[in-house]
Image (spheres, rainbow, N blue to C red):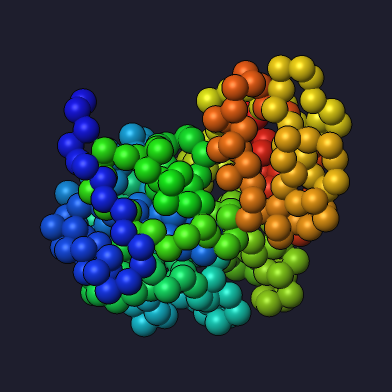
Amino acid sequence: APSPFRTIALPYGEEALEQAARWIAQGQPVAVPTETVYGLAANARDSDAVAAIYAAKRRPSFNPLIVHVDGLAMAERLARFDPVARKLASAFWPGPLTMVLPVREDAGLSPLVMAGLPTVALRLPAHRAMQALIARAGTPLAAPSANRSGAISPTSAAHVAASLGGRIPFILDDGPTTQGLESTIVAPEAGRIRLLRPGPVTPRMLEKASGLPVVAAQGGSIEAPGQLGSHYAPSKPVRLYATEAQADEYLVGFGPVPGAISLSESGDLVEAAANLFAALHIADASSLPRVAVAPVPEDGIGLAINDRLRRAAA
Ligand code: TXA
Ligand code: MG
């Protein structure tokens, strides 16, 4: 299909927010940063707008979207919060935690957002651009990551333009994102918390805040498709746990390893998370036909880094 848009990018500010809000009001999705990755946001109450997100990303329509809110009040009008959900909200919102909760019958969300599930994924982001846009739009915004379905997530406006340029009208550019990995997704349950996608909020942080055990999601269902199969994937083969690169490999290192780039020279996992997707984008754009990635410790946010790396290599 031909590209329907000339994609405009503007730096964060009054003019950019106004233009973004105008596209949202017209039912078009726009790219906007959060603290995790850039999202492709549209009015979660407007089925045509939500359908336009799926179309621009070429995302399968059975993969539901996260709804972004500007406060707990908006969130509680959309979903039922039990005491555990309230506790997690007060500990981690605004921030990189998404909660899957029973959707209210009177939520008024487009059914395309939930893709047939009785639950909705809610998140209150800690980023001025997304917060300001939700407030201006005056409506919850559905926003998946602003990349083609299955590809590497975008942590800068340039990544968005490379993946979705010509397919969306507007990018609100507020620089690189700080966390670099998508939000942690959980489903609070009676007496435990199910982890659907590891992210910046680690199991240890969840257990400490809630006093409840965190259990891993069972694979196989569509409950969080970001959890399944190949995802976050460069266009070339990825080899993990590499201690050195072959001649035809671009090495993404961790720590002071001799490589083309290091996720963190000092071996800092938070810095590595922030750099991960940019490093994969660079490796993908290199002239070498393969990517090799050094081992990253399975600790703290390292769990989420390794989760994304395994899917990139799948
Ligand atoms: O950090 C983030 O979460 C970013 C920014 C833009 O907020 N968004 C993001 O969205 O990563 P996306 O669409 O790339 O990932 C959303 C994940 C998918 O794996 C989807 O299957 C899952 O959330 N999801 C959405 N609604 C769900 C539900 N009701 N039950 C279970 N999983 C759900
Ligand atoms: Mg995504």
Q: Residue 102 placed where, x, y %?
A: 41, 64
Quarter of the image where the N terminus is located:
top left
The residue sitting at 79% across, 58% down in the picture is: 268
Would you say residue 221 is visible in this rendering? no
Q: Looking at the picture, does residue 242 appear above or below residue 202?
A: above
Q: Residue 221 placed where, x, y %?
A: 52, 39
- Say left or right for 19 vs 209: left
How many numbered discs, if any?
0
State the residue lying farthest toward the left: 26
Quarter of the image where the C terminus is located:
top right
Q: Looking at the picture, does residue 29 appear above or below residue 193?
A: above
Q: Residue 134 placed where, x, y %?
A: 31, 71
The residue sitting at 62% across, 32% down in the picture is: 283
Q: Looking at the picture, does residue 230 appear above or below residue 168?
A: above
Please state which of residues 112 and 56 is positioned toward the viewer in this rendering. 56
The residue sitting at 22% across, 33% down in the picture is: 3
- Say left or right for 301 vs 219: right
Res. 245 image quadrant: top right
The residue sitting at 85% across, 40% down in the picture is: 257
- Say left or right for 105 vs 235: left
Would you say residue 126 is visible in this rendering? yes
Q: Residue 50 placed where, x, y %?
A: 25, 50
Res. 236 image quadrant: top right
